[in-house]
Amino acid sequence: MDAFSDSGELYNIRNQFFTNQHQKVKAYALSHFSPEHQLKVLEYQIRSTVALEQDASQLIEHGKSQFPDNEELFQLLSAWDDLKSFGTDDSTYFDDVKQAKFELQAVLTAIYLVKFHKDVDEAIKFLTAYTQTQGSRKYNELEVFLVLIQLHLSQGNFTAANKIFATFEQFPDSTRDSIIYQVLESWLLSIKGESDNISNAYYFYDELLSSDYNEDPQGKFKVLSVLFVLTIQLKHYPEAQELLDQIVELSPKPNADLIANKITYDYLTNHGANVPQLLAELKEVQSDHPVLIDLKEINAKFDEVVQKYKAAA
């Protein structure tokens, strides 16, 4: 039996991990899982701990002693944990990875390239090279596709993202039961536009919200944020305001994406009256946020047009 199928041991924990229910993931006892699945459970727990910005070093040390034949995995997870505490200067692990040996190494190295080197193109190249060398293994390695498609979408390259997603037609039918496939489908539906597509994506996240997120406010924040964007796309502005109010309550500290969403909403509902103040807040929280970069590019193009007009005059 496939451990990730809807009746498999790892079905719930994988769903919870990829929907940001990290406290639930951490709460599991390894002894409740079969020995052959305990390493994967611990991997999810370590990654959830890091995602919550907590120290995972004790879990990693426990894993090293309990699973001594998996040194490469724990070396990777240790380097990933160190990034949260020490930044990039204390380890060259990810810079030294030129070709990934296994899926998680490919995924985390690509994320490292984006977050710490701001190099989306290199991350895409790195992941693409990995997917092209995996053969039949790729059918069981879906997270690499999740990150790769997300990176293409971050560049506005819907065609490339959709082309990769279309390859899932060649995968076993069980693949489409995966939470990863469902998340990817929701992203692409929302970007395709049209009411039915956006509504289907909305219902997916609305159903996720029916999970108990009381112990996972970080996860609830992310789900509500997606619902807010989809509600804006549907032009349901009163409902969007209700979602925005809930999101603000869940944000313990200034959040760049929340401020960016406020900017979008203010343009749509308040003629942008508060945008200058919000842009200043965004710049203080994250000076390289995509909204600020896009705005800088737009202003540069506008200035270029003005200069050409002056020259022609």
Image (tube, grey):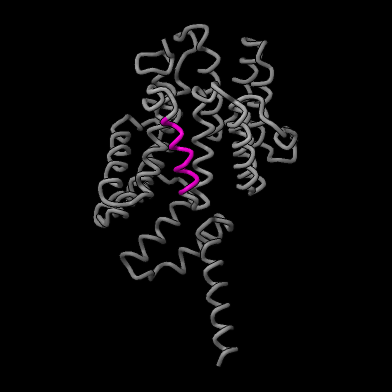
Instruction: Left or right? Give the position of 258 relative to 97.
Output: left
Residue at 45%, 20% (x, y): give it. 27
Quarter of the picture containing the C terminus is bottom right
User: Can residue 71 be seen by looking at this rendering?
Assistant: yes
Of residues 96 and 311, the one nearer the viewer is 311
Q: Which residue lies furthest to the bottom in this view?
A: 313
Residue at 40%, 43% (x, y): give it. 187
Is 161 contained in the magenta span? yes
Where residue 167 sits in the image (x, y, percent)? 46, 34
Instruction: Left or right? Give the position of 68 relative to 272.
Output: right
* Vertical position of residue 166 compared to residue 283: above or below: above
Q: Bounds of the magenta span?
A: 159-169
Which image quarter: residue 112? top right
Residue at 33%, 49% (x, y): give it. 230
Where residue 192 sits in the image (x, y, percent)? 36, 49
Give the number of callouts: 0
Quarter of the picture containing the N terminus is top left
* Vertical position of residue 182 compared to residue 262: above or below: above
Instruction: Left or right? Give the position of 21 relative to 50.
Output: left
Residue at 57%, 72% (x, y): give it. 300
Taken as a whole, is the magenta stretch helix, strand or loop?
helix
Instruction: Left or right? Give the position of 157 relative to 237.
Output: right
Is 152 contained in the magenta span? no
* Vertical position of residue 241 compared to residue 90: above or below: below
User: Can residue 254 be seen by looking at this rendering?
Assistant: no
Of residues 132 and 14, the one nearer the viewer is 132
Q: Residue furthest front?
A: 170
Where residue 199 sits in the image (x, y, percent)? 27, 45
Where residue 237 sits in the image (x, y, percent)? 26, 57
